[in-house]
Amino acid sequence: MQISWTYRVVSNHSYNLLHSIHSEHTMRCPHVLGIVGYSGSGKTTLIEAMLPLLCTRGLRVALIKHTHKDVDVDKPIDGKAKDTWRHRKAGAQQVLLVAPKRWVHINELDELHPPPTLEEQLDLLAPCDLVLVEGFKFAQIPKIEITRKLEPLLYPADSRVIAVASTLGQEAFAKKVPHYLNLDEPAEVAAFILQRLGLHK
């Protein structure tokens, strides 16, 4: 039986907010925006470039990333096993590692303990202004679709796609996009997010 897992990394200053994780997420994180597209389209690169632009506006930004890979944050390196990895392999269903500047909560998953839904993941977050969600293409949230080639796209069938960010130029798309953004201009995409969500501070 293959076991996968999920984990949380949170800055230490929000450690005392653990008691409130079951509050209504729409009150604590009122804006959720998906960054969607096929693998290799540039989602991670765009988010990495936009985060400093959003944070310098005084926004508290959280990120949820969905992956189909069996990632392992504490996998042994050079034959040296991490304590948390040893504890998990010994049978611990959950491991909480607390350090001076961040903490990590690792949960083992199997058929009896499936991954949390996006809604449940949002409920785990500390209060913030914006949650960027990388992946979850079919989630019922507003999305910016990322593409570098004319491949099968979510828009226009998915009305929750509020913009398409691409390097192809708006004229390359047979059907009118809801809002065209230049994928090579992260500042343009960030400005659109701020304006569309009313997040100017």
Image (tube, rainbow, N blue to C red):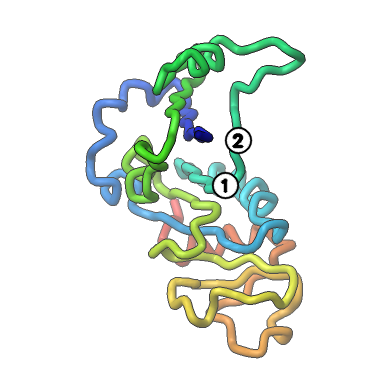
Identified by mark 2, the residue type is Val
> Left or right of 123: which side holds 8?
right
Please give the residue where the numbered disc 1 appears in the rendered image.
67
Neighbour tally class for label 2: few under 14, some 14-19, many 20 plus, Cα within 10 Å: few
Q: Nearer the viewer, residue 81 or 181?
A: 81
Q: Where does residue 152 sit, x and y in percent of width and height?
A: 64, 76
* Residue shown at the point (44%, 51%) measured from the top left: 201
Please give left or right for residue 35 compared with residue 17 in the image: right
Q: Position of residue 85 (x, y in %)?
A: 56, 17
Front one among 173 and 154: 154
Q: Which residue lies furthest to the front in this view?
A: 1
Determine whether 29 is above or below 189 in the image: above
Question: Is residue 7 rendered to the left or right of residue 80?
Answer: left
Which residue matches tag 2?
Answer: 71
Q: In this view, does 172 lie above or below 158?
A: below
Is mark 1 in CB contact (under 8 Å) with mark 2?
yes
Q: Label 1's element?
A: loop
- Horizontal and vertical percent position of residue 81: 64, 12
130 or 10, nearer to the observer = 10
Residue at 39%, 50% (x, y): give it.
Answer: 118
Kind of element beneath mark 2: loop
Say the numbered circle drawn on residue 152.
none
Q: Which amino acid does label 1 sit on?
A: Thr
Instruction: State the CA–CA distance, disc 1 to disc 2.
Output: 8 Å
